[in-house]
Image: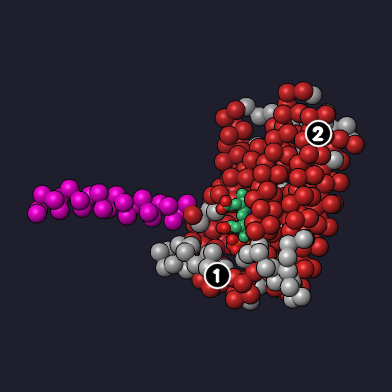
Amino acid sequence: MSASLETTTPRASLAEAGSELRDWLALLKPRVISLVVFTGAAGMAVAPKWPSVPLGLIDMLCICVGAGAAGAINMWYDRDIDAVMKRTSVRPIPDDRMDADSALIYGVVLSVASVALLWLASNARAAGILAFSIFFYAVIYTMWLKRSTPQNIVIGGAAGAFPPMIGWAAATGHMAVLPVVMFAIVFLWTPPHFWSLSLYACKDYTRAGIPMLPVVKGARHTRYQIVFYTIILMAVSLVPSFLHLCGMIYTVTATALGAGFMYFALRVLMDKQDASGVSQTADKPARYAFRYSLAYLFFLFLGLLIDRVLFS
Ligand code: HEM
Ligand SMILES: CC(C)=CCC/C(C)=C/CC/C(C)=C/COP(=O)(O)OP(=O)(O)O
């Protein structure tokens, strides 16, 4: 008996340490920031000048930690509504696995550290944009817009759109048209990305009292808005082609991906719904559109990267 205790106790404490580590990581919203960091890396890769590999990796680490830190502050502030929503109730703070103050300190320390390290590793411009995006996501979106207007994610989406500009600025020290167009692409991509999810997570947002578009204006209005933003996104995604900032590989990729997004957006629009705009089909089209949005942004920027790096 005592022998079995001796062997299981260290294992149990190791498992406990592992699950604690997983909670600290979960506070950084790792799945979301994987794509955020990819857009930052794309912004750096398409720049005319590259940093050395070690410095480039440090720059990416800073975007990753900075975006994650903003996510931790978001989870600290939103702990009341996260507890009410099914999707978020299992997060470390609402599930009582982590103390809220520790999460806040963690978020603030990592925010300051990521901005300072980016400044040291690259320049003040890149660090300044990172600091501004953290502030925008944690304060402007989370503490102000999210709970006050159905346009919350349209304006707040700017926070998640800055990484390509950070990547470019870290590489060159300057700003240019292409990273600003990449900003515009992510900015316009955010509404169809998020509103697709909000259509099938609408009950959660209603329960939490968050004025997301489908809660305030209904599913029908949200579906039209998804199509509207998808059309503008398709047009703006072709700006690099019209400005001769890329070649045919990107143009073909953007056109095909845009047509795909339009297809999924129209399926969302045509989803069977009753007069109140409530879906009759468990919002399957909205789930597909959400998933497609993730693939769209990844492959669009991959296409741009391949075009600029290999063929320009
Ligand atoms: C204000 C802007 C945005 C809002 C409100 C938003 C909202 C959301 C929400 C609520 C989820 C579900 C997360 C979960 O289940 O825990 C999600 C998932 C995701 N978002 Fe966004 N998002 C925004 C911008 C972005 C941006 C800019 C990116 C990347 C460039 C991004 C990438 C992702 C990814 C990769 C997922 C999937 C995560 C997974 O697989 O669990 N989002 N988004
Ligand atoms: C460089 C930098 C700071 C980038 C910020 C990138 C970033 C994390 C953008 C926002 C993406 C996101 C997870 C929004 C969730 O909104 P929510 O908080 O309403 O979602 P939730 O209900 O899942 O918490």
The image shows residue 238 at horizontal and vertical percentages of 85, 40
Residue 134 appears anywhere in the view = no
Q: Is residue 130 in the magenta section?
A: no
C-alpha distance separating marks 2 and 1: 41 Å
From the viewer's perspective, is residue 251 above or below residue 206?
Answer: above
Q: Is residue 9 in the magenta section?
A: yes
Residue range corresponding to the magenta coloring: 1-25
Point 17% across, 48% down: residue: 7
- The residue carrying mark 2 is 252
Q: Is residue 134 left or right of residue 20?
A: right
Indicate the secondary structure of the residue bearing disc 2: helix
The image shows residue 177 at horizontal and vertical percentages of 84, 40
In the rendered structure, find residue 85 and report the number of the disc placed on it: 1
Point 77% across, 49% down: residue: 263
The image shows residue 147 at horizontal and vertical percentages of 67, 72
Is label 2 or label 1 in front? Answer: 2
Q: Earlier in the sequence, mark 2 or mark 1?
A: 1
The type of residue carrying mark 2 is Val
The type of residue carrying mark 1 is Met
